[in-house]
Amino acid sequence: MGCPAAENLVRAGIGYIGLIDNDIVNLSNIHRQSLFTSKDIKKLKVSVAAKKKKRNKSIYQN
């Protein structure tokens, strides 16, 4: 789905978003993923996304 899509869905008022991703944040992909920072390197992408998005709306994490 991608970071921009998830951010837009949250801003649009979608009540729950299911996130499934077994990948971790790497330095090589931070520059194109607006959700992650260097502090998130080696963390699961879905865990970081859920924590950051929960501030705005509910997210269901799988």
Image: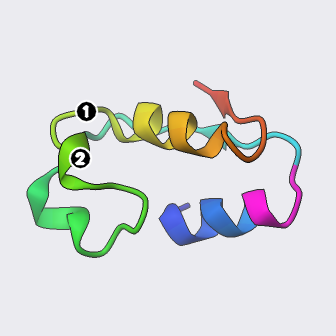
Is 44 rendered above or below residue 2?
above
Locate residue 41: give its quadrant: top left
- Callout 2 secondary element: loop
Q: Is residue 17 magenta?
A: no
Is 42 rendered above or below residue 9?
above
**Which label is found at residue 25?**
2
Image coordinates for residue 60, horizontal then vertical, percent:
70, 29
Judged from this view, the residue extending furthest toward the left is 28
The residue singled out by tag 1 in the image is 43
Residue drawn at x 58%, y 24% is 62
Image coordinates for residue 17, horizontal then vertical, percent:
73, 43
- The magenta-colored residue range is 10-14
Locate residue 53: give its quadrant: top right
The answer to which of 55 and 15 lies nearer the viewer is 55
**Tag 1–tag 2 contact (CB < 8 Å):** yes
The answer to which of 42 and 51 lies nearer the viewer is 51
